[in-house]
Every structure is written in C-alpha cells, then in structure tokens.
Image: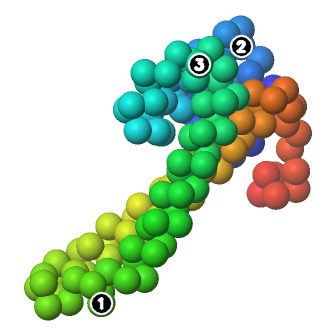
Amino acid sequence: MYLPPEWPPEVRPPSVPEWEISAVAWLLDAVPPDYRAYEVLRRHPLALARMALHHVESAVRAARAGYRSAAVELKGHLPPHAVEAVLDVYREEGPRLVRLARSIGVVERALRGEMFTPTMRDVR
C-alpha cells in the first residue's frame, strides 16, 4: 500500500487492522493534554483529527504572527542575542508545525477512507 511522504512514521498504515489505534495515540500527542479527557475523541478518530488540524493550523498562524512581531515586542526587554534566539525558535517551530499539519491532514484523509496513489511529485 502506498503512503504519501507526509504520512507520520508513528502511525501504522491503513492497510493494517486497527491502525486507527496508532492514529489516535499520535493525534493525541499533537493536541493539548486536556484533549485526552474526552472519550468521544478516542471513539471517533476522525473528530480528533479534525480538532487536531484546527489546533495545529492555529499554532502555525500564531507562530507566524509571533515571528513577525517578536523583534519589535522584545527589543529593549531582552538582549539582542536573546531576541535572535527567540526568532531561531520560530524559524524551527514554524516549519515543524506546517509539516505536522500536513501529516494530520493525510491521516484525516485516510480516516475518511481515502486511498492514496503516488503522483509525479512523489516519484522524485
């Protein structure tokens, strides 16, 4: 079975019985710990995936906003090297969050029953 490059290694392929269990565990790691208290999200992985995607997409927007404003907001409150270190954190976290959102998106598609086929983009 083909899996897209964004497929998270922690999630078993949809061709494996009960693969959703690994998807739920992985998705719960992508959201705040309080989400674990809601049994409905464990029973309905698609709902968890949808909520996780909204959460991570919000984090992407927040990281972008934080990156744009950090230098101005922190100037005068932190030494220049600390401001640059904060910007470095945003430079690492932003792309990580974008990759996470893409991975959540493909897991959500699989939970909806979509089968994946390779594209020319994937062949490179």
Mark toward the start of the polypeptide (3 vs 1): 3
| Number of the front mark, 2 or 1 | 1
Q: Which type of secondary structure does the marked residue at label 3 adopt?
A: helix
User: In the picture provided, is 89 more to the left or to the right than 115?
Assistant: left
Quarter of the figure that contains the C terminus: bottom right
User: In the picture provided, is 114 more to the left or to the right than 111?
Assistant: right
Q: Establish if 16 lies above or below 38.
A: above
**Residue 44 visible in the displayed image:** yes
Q: Position of residue 96 (x, y in %)?
A: 48, 56
Q: Mark 1 points at which residue?
A: 72
Residue visible at 32% across and 80% down in the picture: 70
Q: Mark 3 points at which residue?
A: 40
Residue visible at 44% across and 67% down in the picture: 63
User: In the picture provided, is 91 more to the left or to the right than 47?
Assistant: left
Q: Where is residue 95 in the image (x, y as percent from the top left)?
A: 51, 63
Marks 3 and 2 sit apart, C-alpha to C-alpha, by 23 Å
| Number of the front mark, 3 or 2 | 3
Residue visible at 74% across and 22% down in the picture: 14
Label 3 sits on what residue type?
A: Val
Q: Establish if 35 lies above or below 64.
A: above
Q: Name the residue under label 2.
A: 16
Closer-to-camera residue (36/95)? 36
Q: Where is residue 19 in the image (x, y as percent from the top left)?
A: 66, 16
